[in-house]
């Protein structure tokens, strides 16, 4: 368990004890009271991924959305991804509040930008202890999901890349909920293919790109055959990784969208061949690059 998770558990426990100080004993033990359930995970109903290539690094934003379908309040800290030196933000969004858990020690993780500056200023004066308590209460509240409520956890990271032949590999944020997928991304100033293999895939992997070109209303068969290409991805292991393959231009992106991309994995004993389902995404929000600074 990371230091961040240990700290969050302590904050939640402290917040609950503070709350009990203001609850009469009869109400605290009332049969109809809703308990905090620390063991049951929230129901994740959607996730999203944004990627932006930034030179020798990749900016990644992973958002996971939760809904509490049960009858007990849920502690979202069990669903937090691990933070490391590459993590730039770890946000919890709930009920129009946004709390960046990485800025807890700096006094910046509050509901809104204006409130963040107010708390930061207060923390430098005589009311530092009171501001700290307010901040802890906001964090504890953000991580508790009442029945029927929704929330999202967002991790923003700047990950270094490693060259693997014609591809670039980077690890995804540890613990982030990212599903296997294949995306053609048009970043306006660059086009590339993003592949996230299944986390249980093992062995040596390679892609076969089969673009589909048209000349007028006819298939350009010669160009189609010349353009087929094999991209070696190397060995897949337990680290959840993504691969970026730069494309020459938008015409190649469109030809791949109309064509096919196949993934082959081989362990020596067996080979698995699959045609990938492609999605096309335009340039991510410009706020992604700023969030990763």
Image (cartoon, rainbow, N blue to C red):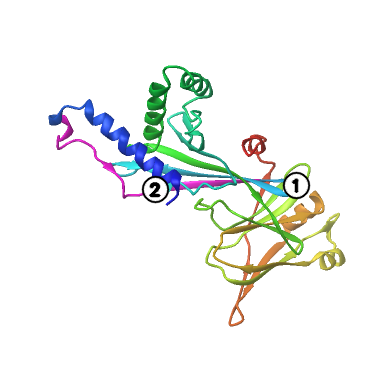
Residue at the limit of the structure toward the bottom, as seen here: 269
Q: Nearer the viewer, residue 147 or 59?
A: 59
Residue lying at 78% horizontally and 42% vertically, measured from the top left: 189
Q: Indicate whether residue 42 is drawn in magenta.
A: yes
Q: Quadrant of residue 7?
A: top left
- How far apart, in angstroms, are the residues tagged by discs 2 and 1? 34 Å
Q: Nearer the viewer, residue 152 or 11?
A: 11
Instruction: Please say whether residue 250 is visible from this viewpoint.
Output: yes
Considering the image in quadrants, where does the C terminus appear? top right
**What secondary structure is marked by label 2?**
helix
Q: Indicate whether residue 29 is drawn in magenta.
A: yes
Start-end of magenta stretch: 27-51
- Label at residue 55: 1
Residue 158 place in picture, x, y as percent: 63, 45
Q: How many numbered markers are drawn?
A: 2
Q: Is residue 39 left or right of residue 82?
A: left
Q: Earlier in the sequence, mark 2 or mark 1?
A: 1
Q: Quadrant of residue 181?
A: bottom right
Residue 186 place in picture, x, y as percent: 73, 46
Residue 242 place in picture, x, y as percent: 63, 57
Residue identifier under label 2: 78
Residue lying at 48% horizontally and 28% vertically, measured from the top left: 107
Q: Is residue 21 left or right of residue 110?
A: left
């Amino acid at each position: 368990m990371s230091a961040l998770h240990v700290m969050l558990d302590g904050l939640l426990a402290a917040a609950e004890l503070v709350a009990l100080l203001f609850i009469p004993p009869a109400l605290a033990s009332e049969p109809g009271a809703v308990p905090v359930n620390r063991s049951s995970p929230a129901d994740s109903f959607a996730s999203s991924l944004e990627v932006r290539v930034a030179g020798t690094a990749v900016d990644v934003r992973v958002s996971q959305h939760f809904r509490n379908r049960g009858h007990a309040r849920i502690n979202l800290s069990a669903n937090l991804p691990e933070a490391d030196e590459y993590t730039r933000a770890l946000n919890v969004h709930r009920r129009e509040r946004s709390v960046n858990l990485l800025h807890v020690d700096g006094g910046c993780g509050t509901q809104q930008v204006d409130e963040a500056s107010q708390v930061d200023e207060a923390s430098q004066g005589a009311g530092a202890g009171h501001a700290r308590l307010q901040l802890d209460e906001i964090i504890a509240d953000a991580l508790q999901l009442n029945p029927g409520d929704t929330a999202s956890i967002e991790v923003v990271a700047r990950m270094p890349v490693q060259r693997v032949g014609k591809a670039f590999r980077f690890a995804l944020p540890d613990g982030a909920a990212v599903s296997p997928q294949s995306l053609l991304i048009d970043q306006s100033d660059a086009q590339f293919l993003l592949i996230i293999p299944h986390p249980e895939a093992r062995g040596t992997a390679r892609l076969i790109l089969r673009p589909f070109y048209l000349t007028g209303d006819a298939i350009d068969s010669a160009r189609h055959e010349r353009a087929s290409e094999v991209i070696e991805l190397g060995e897949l292991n337990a680290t959840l990784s993504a691969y970026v393959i730069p494309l020459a231009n938008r015409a190649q992106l469109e030809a791949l969208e109309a064509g096919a991309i196949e993934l082959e994995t081989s362990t020596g004993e067996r080979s698995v061949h699959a045609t990938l389902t492609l999605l096309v995404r335009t340039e991510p929000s410009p706020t992604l690059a700023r969030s990763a600074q």
